[in-house]
Image (cartoon, rainbow, N blue to C red):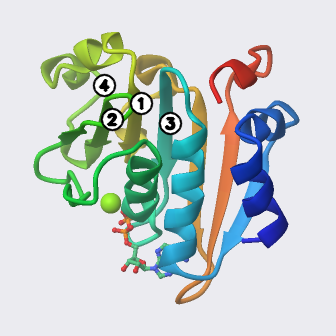
Amino acid sequence: MRRSMAESMTQHSSYIGELLAAGRVVLTTASTEETEEVGRLMGCAVSGPLVLTLAGDLGSGKTCFARGLARGLGVDEAYPVTSPTYTIVNEYPGRLPLFHLDLYRLGGGDELEEIGYRDMQQQGGVIVVEWPERSDDAELGTDLVITMNEEGPDERVITMRCLHPDVDLKEQF
Ligand SMILES: Nc1ncnc2c1ncn2[C@@H]1O[C@H](COP(=O)(O)OP(=O)(O)O)[C@@H](O)[C@H]1O
Ligand SMILES: [Mg+2]
């Protein structure tokens, strides 16, 4: 991750909103900690309801990013942020409620109802979804699409894209 970007993201909470409004953001991280830090900085910046999806192969760092996001949202270290593969959804108390989902075991988008997705949306918090391919962006109400790619043992390329170019994300970040 380029240091200048980390600094800017910390200093200006609206920076992510501005970057995303300008288009796609691509970051390369060189360690687990750096990916967590990118997630954390995003979590620090969020100030309103947000749905973000994390696509990428097993081991690409999705849960790692979600863990950082939780810390940035103020979820206490006492709450271990682990993969919701078996629970499908884990909820954490932060500045905003955080719902961490893993849809890997979901049969299809219509099962979103069964897991209480609409109720989660109504709580006005942050929803972060691993394996969003089991549903789709319209069903999920996705705001931000994040893709993680493994480029080497410790190198990951993180691409972020906002699905509402017409929306001023600065209100959310
Ligand atoms: N730059 C990096 N970013 C994220 N994880 C990394 C990185 N380098 C190595 N790793 C390792 O890759 C694995 C990612 O696991 P995890 O976050 O559970 O992936 P996923 O949820 O995509 O299956 C962890 O073992 C982590 O330590
Ligand atoms: Mg995972």
Q: Name, please, the residue furthest toward the right.
A: 22
Q: Identity of the amino acid at label 1?
A: Val
For the residues labelled 2 and 3, the Cα–Cα distance comes to 11 Å
Mark 3 and 1 residues: CB-CB less than 8 Å, in contact? yes
Residue of label 3: 52
Q: Nearer the viewer, residue 164 or 123?
A: 123
The answer for how far apart the CA atoms under marks 3 and 1 are is 8 Å
Q: Identify the residue at image location x=64%, y=60%.
A: 158
Report the mark closest to the observer, 2 or 3.
2
Q: Quadrant of residue 108?
A: top left
**Label 3 vs label 4, nearer the camera:** 3
Amino acid found under the numbered disc labelled 2:
Leu
In whole angstroms, how far apart are the C-alphas of marks 2 and 1?
5 Å
Label 4 vs label 1: CA separation? 19 Å
Q: Earlier in the sequence, mark 4 or mark 1?
A: 4
Tell me which label, 4 or 2, sits earlier in the chain: 2
Marker disc for residue 109: 4
Residue 28's spot in the image, x, y percent? 70, 71
